Image (tube, rainbow, N blue to C red):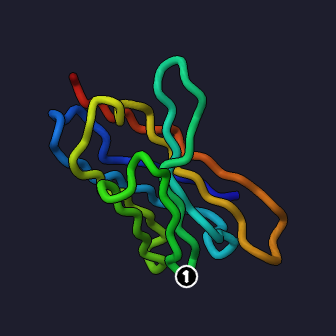
Amino acid sequence: QVRLVESGGGLVQAGGSLRLSCAASGITFSIGAMGWYRQAPGKQRELVATITRGSSTNYADSVKGRFTISRDNAKNTVYLQMNSLKPEDTAVYYCNAKTGPGFVSNDYWGQGTQVTVPS
């Protein structure tokens, strides 16, 4: 099992920045890709960004150029640096980890952290 704990959410004015962190514990050697998803009220959960163990990244078009995902494999932690925040970025942000090749396929989720950007 893998446990994910997010931190760093909060309220920030439009144009501001926040940095989210997600620390993994448990069977961390089984983790492959990690990522961030978000869910706004009344909307489906959507992908924000993902990063492989080798640090290849993928971003949603809506956050390209503003958000940066990174990871520290030694600390089993993934980060999301969010700049130039907009009201439409308001959502609960969830950390995700997927098991890598050679392990039983599993999807792990954190409890979520609220990000609020008032309009």
Q: What residue do we see at 18% from left, 35% from top?
A: 14
- Label 1: few (<14), some (14–19) or many (≥20) C-alpha neighbours in 10 Å: few
The type of residue carrying mark 1 is: Gly
The image shows a total of numbered marks equal to 1
Q: Name above or below for residue 19 compared with residue 71.
A: above
Residue 80: x, y in percent?
37, 57
In this view, which residue lies farthest toward the top? 42
Q: Quadrant of the C terminus?
A: top left
Image position of 31 (left or right of 76): right
For residue 64, what is the image quadrant?
bottom left
Q: Quadrant of the N terminus?
A: bottom right
Mark 1 lies on residue: 54
Q: Name above or below for residue 82 compared with residue 52.
A: above
In this view, which residue lies farthest toward the front? 61
Q: What residue do we see at 65% from left, 69% from top?
A: 31
Residue 5: x, y in percent?
47, 50
Image position of 97 (left or right of 114): right
Instruction: Depth check: give the residue in front, 3 or 10.
Output: 10
Residue 90: x, y in percent?
35, 31
Q: What residue do we see at 55% from left, 24% from top?
A: 43
Q: Name above or below for residue 104 compared with residue 96.
A: below
Q: What residue do we see at 76% from left, 57% from top?
A: 106
| Label 1 element class | loop
Residue 100: x, y in percent?
72, 72
Instruction: Depth check: give the residue in front, 18 or 31.
Output: 18
Image position of 84 (left or right of 38): left
